[in-house]
Amino acid sequence: MNTIWEILPGLGDKLAAHVVLSASAIGLAMLIALPMAVWAGRSRIVSRLALSLASLVQTIPALALLALFFPLLLSLRSVFGEGLPTLGFLPALMALTLYALLPILRNAVTAQANLDEGVLEAADGVGMTKWQKLYLVEAPLSAPFIMAGIRTASVWTIGAATLATTIGQPSLGDPIFAGLQTQNWALVLAGCLASAGLALAADNLLWVIEVGLARRKRWMTFGGMAIVLLGILAALWAQRPASEERPVVIAAKSFSEQYILAQLIGSRLEAAGYRVEYRDGLGSAVVHSAVANSSVDISVDYTGTIWANFLKRADNPGREAMYETIRDWEAKANGVKVLGRLGFENAYAFAMRADRAQELGVTSLADLVGKGRSLTVGGDPEFFERPEWLAVRDAYGLRFGKTRNFAPTFMYNALQSGEADVISAYTSDGRIAADRLVVLADPKGALPSYDALLLLSPRIADDPGVAAALQPLLGAISVEAMREANFAVDREDAGKLTPKQAAEMLANRAGL
Amino acid sequence: MFVLVHPHSKPLGKGQSETLAQRRNTRYSSQKMTNPPPLLRFDGVTCRFGDVTAVGGVSCDIAKGCFVAMVGASGSGKSTLLKTVNTLVEPTGGRVLFAGEDVSELPPARLRRRVGYVFQGIGLFPHMSVAENIAIGPRLAGEKLAAARIAELLELVELDPAYATRMPDELSGGQRQRVGVARALAGEPELLIMDEPFGALDPVTRDALGHKVRELHTRLGLTTVMVTHDMAEALLLADRVLVMDKGALVADEAPHTLLMGAGGAAAQALVAVPRDQAERLAAMEGRLA
């Protein structure tokens, strides 16, 4: 496994993207907040309204704020046309800008309100116009306080920008999310160190500017500004497109299997001469829309997920019928090509610790009826909102004492530590075997099938080279092979592999 | 209504004062020459803030060259009335005429460059050096004040020209107010208005600066209106004392007529304080002698 020091130098691209995103958000927030603060200084209503709105934004969790821009931009496409990006830089910029407004606005308004009355009277007394007063007196005297607000905003924004990963904007959040999902703590730490280092560097540089403004040391002010500007320019330079042609973008949702499969797909395409780019850690709903509008090109999705979430179906017509319905629907409704099935299923299944199941005498979901009230059921963050959960609950009439959400990797730990009695496990998960878990039978067939599918965006749907490179993967991956690869990434001991290594192992096992 | 002209006012000197005089003359010559208008005229000025009447219908004329002190207790409306001159306060009734023109019709920025303003808060710009503070008025008018002129202004207020490069927070209270006076004079104003200019200073500095301002008034041929709550200061510096009480102008006298008992009860109550103090001090000296 890589150590932090081996990972850090490889984060240059992510760092550059992070700097460009954060700097753009802070710059835009300044462009909005500073004129607004001037206006607020002249009208109490504006001041109240602006500050309340900015505070309100702060109460929305950054992750939710980022995610909310996806549907917003999607609906705005009816106005601005299909070219409007709904994922990546634009929504990340908008969310982070909103987030950065408050500290800048509040400090600027407070600074104005706290200006010495005598100085303001003198400004009027010597005959300054409103603009001269603003430019010659109010602005220079408020500048150190405004700069302090910009500093706070910068630290917040650099921190929150790591969350941009979830809406498909590369940032230092990429290694953090990837590491969290694959329990690669070195990767998580490297991402955290890099973003914390960036935040500290920005904080100190802006502090130098602030002190320069407060003590009227021009060399400090301009020196600090020059370094900040150089940093941003360097990041922009590093961000310049390497070539005109867009690489094939491979998406991964935020769990180990997706990271491994993304690497497997990527390595095959690279071997076939394609340039590839990875977009890791995307939300389940985001990935599907992203493929449909060609923001990403390839994703692995599951029949049950598409069935319930996008076709909004609750019935279960059987595995083959489901696959064919989905294949036709994707082609017709989205222009997405379902290249085929990889061969294994990653279905939702309810799992328990063997000793606990024996103690309670439970082997199937039907056995839980009547016993559920004293039990805690754990699920991934979206599980209890999903139609599968409702279907199972209503089919068996299940009532649990408590439901708790866990990140997928932590769900198994929760089962071991007794914080959950039953969890919504995944059938391809290596830890089912490793932890000797009992998978509860589903005699009523309430849970749909979850065949892993290879989806191609409309942009590359008819690319024969892509299809040829990926064709050998279809039907080649058994659930045992997938479990083994997943477990290799999830395990904590010396046998732990990176998703890339696990992908190689999987390729060997599948005879590719 | 009568006008007292300062008895010591001399013909205007050379240089800037001459140009000031010319400016005034041209303005006056455009009007009827029979009776030149006063430099400043309050015409039924009323200032209400909600239910409170700060100034209730004050009328009076101030001739050019005059040093007028406006005296009254706190809340008598004297500061409010003064600030109607440079429109820092807008009257709710009546009007203020400056050199015959209604101040509310003059562009405020231009008006304030013609009226030097000194006030208790001083309000030196803390981010500007002494020189930049003094030069701010001309700078706003698009002129650059020469270093020699800044040195001259500093010497006028008895500060070493080396102070030009200092920042306001390096100065004492008295030095700051001297700079405040120099700043007010930098634009060669026709009128100097002062709102409790020495209120925050220690007695020694206060006395010295009072004398200095009076001397500059005479030397530069200024017209000065000073608001103060200190009757002794008013009597010793001014040619003419206006007494305000509850928003009304209750007395308009020369210092010596006030001392002889004119001006009514409110004015005499204010005169009684320094007189009483002086008598007690004299009595103490007599006892010691």
Image: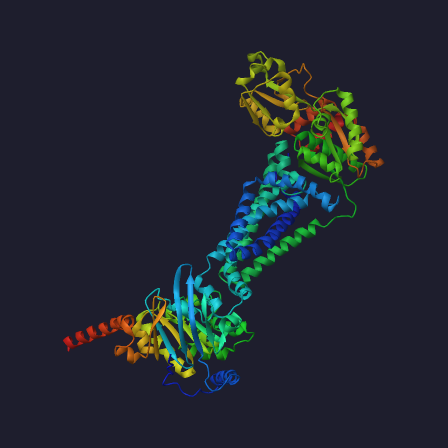
Looking at the figure, which quarter contains the C terminus of chain B? Answer: bottom left
Residue occupying the point 61% across, 38% down: A176
Q: Nearer the viewer, residue B120 or A7?
A: B120
Q: Is residue A254 left or right of residue B92?
A: right
Specify the color scheme. rainbow
Residue A467 falls in which quadrant of the image? top right
**Residue A171 at x, y percent in the picture:** 64, 43
Q: Is residue A52 left or right of residue B83?
A: right
Place of residue A190 in the rendered image (x, y in percent of width and height, measured from the top left): 60, 40
- Is A130 situated above or below A438? below
Q: Between residue A74 and residue A466, name the one nearer to us.
A: A74
Q: Quadrant of the N terminus of chain B?
A: bottom left
Lateral position of residue A453 relative to residue A138, left or right: right
All told, the count of numbered labels is 0
Q: Looking at the image, is A119 positioned above or below residue A80?
A: below
Query: Is residue B9 visible to us here?
Result: yes
Could you say which is closer to the camera, residue B258 or residue A474? B258
Q: Residue furthest right?
A: A464
Is residue A115 placed above or below A160 in the rendered structure?
A: below
Q: Position of residue B249 (x, y in %)?
A: 35, 71
Q: Residue at x 49, y 54 (%)?
A: A110
Please tell me in which quadrant of the rendered image residue A333 appears.
top right
| Res. A151 visible in picture | no
Residue at (50%, 71%) from the top-left corner? B136
Residue A294: x, y in percent?
76, 39
